Image (cartoon, rainbow, N blue to C red):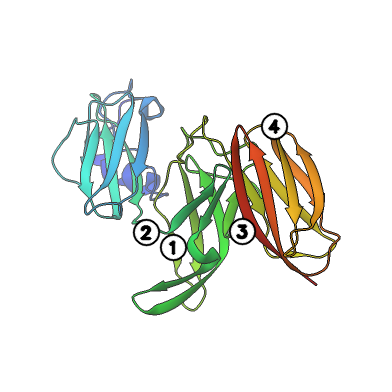
Amino acid sequence: MRVRRSAYVAIMLCLFVSPVQVFAGVADETCVPDSIRPDIRVRMAGDEPNSGAIFISGSGFDYYTVDGGYPQTADSITGLNGGTFVLEFFDGLGCSVQREVSVTVCVPGWLYQRWDDVLSLKNFGVLNVDSITHVFRNFQWYKNDEPIQGATLSYLYVNGGLEPDASYHLEMTRTHSGERIVTCPVRPLIDEDRVFVYVYPSPVRSGEILTIRVSAVATATILNTYGTVVYSLDLQEGLNYVTMNVPSGVYVVRTSIEGETHINHIAVVD
């Protein structure tokens, strides 16, 4: 069926149901709006001024406009510093599809890589910014812009280690204002050949479990402040656990691994 120009406005009013997708009036019965399939990716702004970007690919369109401006064919829109933009994609038959795209302004420098398997918000959710103390809640971690199920604490632990080729960011709510904050994405720095010994938590309660994570087979001794050995341990690569059935106090964990000696101090509390 061929659409008359006089019916164009009426068709537009009927079809303008969603602010996200609009099909314009057409002048040819072969026009198929569903064939216009833009693929849009967004880079947050915040690491550097005007560092936000929109990347465009897909099929079925010849050009697009931004907020009703001039036709464009570039595969990216750069130099953005946040905001919401309406992109309209046109094919050669008079069809168009709109997409509303938001570029988020992220906060850089708030994430800290503690170990190869742990990322955290600095100070675990209490930050001093411009001499003001900020407390956060409602945490949600993301990997490659997809939410990580169950990752709702101020830190992220990944069993088996963080992925060096993945990007991670955190969204959270500022407690006093209700404002939603997004950290800039980070990529973990993983040195697979590095020798390491991680001992946590400290303090640990008497009778509870201390975790020792090592990069290779090792041995460890735990000594009290008098130099008395309270535990001697053969450690396997990865995670090792010891129940600290000892009195409260400060203890030394001495680990021998790959010809190196690592010393960690821990506190045991009642």
Of residues 267 and 177, the one nearer the viewer is 267
Q: Marks 2 and 1: which is nearer the front?
A: 2
Residue contact between numbered discs 2 and 3, judged by CB atoms under 8 Å: no
Q: Secondary structure at mark 1?
A: strand
Residue contact between numbered discs 2 and 1, judged by CB atoms under 8 Å: yes
Q: CA distance from mark 1 to mark 3?
A: 14 Å
Give the residue type that dot 4 points to.
Answer: Val
Q: Residue furthest top?
A: 30
Write down the residue under mark 1: 181
Q: Marks 4 and 3: which is nearer the front?
A: 4
The answer to whether 261 is drawn above or below residue 226 in the figure is above
The answer to whether 126 is drawn above or below residue 91 in the figure is below
Q: Reading the chain from its start, which is encountered first: label 1 or label 3?
A: 3
Instruction: Tell me the residue at 29%/55% (across/down).
Output: 82
Instruction: Tell me the residue at 40%/79% (across/down).
Output: 132
Write down the residue under mark 3: 153
Residue contact between numbered discs 1 and 4, judged by CB atoms under 8 Å: no
Q: Residues within 10 Å of mark 4 (few under 14, many from 20)?
A: few
Q: Reading the chain from its start, which is encountered first: label 1 or label 4?
A: 1
Q: CA distance from mark 2 to mark 4?
A: 40 Å
Q: Marks 1 and 3: which is nearer the front?
A: 3
Of residues 115 and 140, the one nearer the viewer is 115
The answer to whether 172 is drawn above or below residue 62 in the figure is below
Q: Marks 1 and 4: which is nearer the front?
A: 4
- Give the number of the disc on residue 107: 2
Left or right: where does residue 37 sit relative to residue 243?
left
Q: Reading the chain from its start, which is encountered first: label 2 or label 4?
A: 2
